[in-house]
Image (cartoon, rainbow, N blue to C red):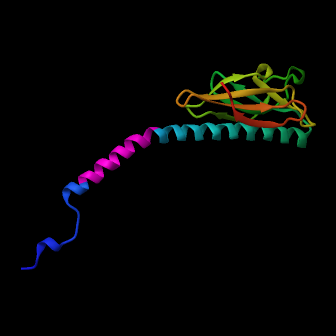
Amino acid sequence: MKNLMNKRGFTLIEVVIVAVIIGIILTIAIPRFGKVMTRLKMKTSGRDIISQLRLARSYAVSQKKPFGVYFDIENNQYVLFEDVVNLSSKTYDYGDSTIKTLTLPGDINFSYSSFNNDVVIFKANGSTSSSGSVDLYSEEVYDYLMIDVLASTGRVRMYKSGY
């Protein structure tokens, strides 16, 4: 009979110890992973808003017509539109040509908009109706992002807000 002690493998105790160690590591890592994912969603949402603002500016310059983005703070939505109704009011009105309506992910919210009537309108020369910003936040990670628009040039930028 061959020596059974020379067989290679893992004992049940070794497997259990490895499973416990993996469980402890996962218990520590999963909450952090959730926060990382929320921060990534927040940055992605900010970049999406910047894309829509830059698209509105591009449309305004190329078509020589006013285009804008309306921030619906209550419903966490933003609307890319062509301003065709009541041009002097610089608002998003019933009858304006809606191009796209987008909604923020569930755990990301608008906290504040400093734009008049929560609207930024881009003119044919690329400038905007007014300077301002819109803030995003997440209660899950207690983090804020600010998207800022400069009126004279239409420049759009995002940075972490210092609340």
Q: Quadrant of the C terminus?
A: top right
The foreground one among 47 and 123 is 47
Q: Position of residue 138 (x, y in %)?
A: 58, 29
What residue lies at 87% left-to-right and 32% top-to-bottom?
66
Which residues are the magenta region?
16-31
Q: Is residue 101 visible?
A: yes
Q: Position of residue 117 (x, y in %)?
A: 78, 19
Left or right side of 79 for 59: right
Q: Is residue 24 magenta?
A: yes
Q: Quadrant of the N terminus?
A: bottom left
The foreground one among 103 and 129 is 129
Q: Position of residue 112 (x, y in %)?
A: 69, 22
Q: Is residue 95 visible?
A: no
Q: Is residue 109 above or below residue 58?
A: above
Q: Position of residue 92 (x, y in %)?
A: 78, 24
Asked where in the image residue 39 lies, by quadrant, the reply is: top right
Left or right side of 66 for 39: left
Q: Is residue 116 magenta?
A: no
Q: Is residue 51 above or below residue 2?
A: above
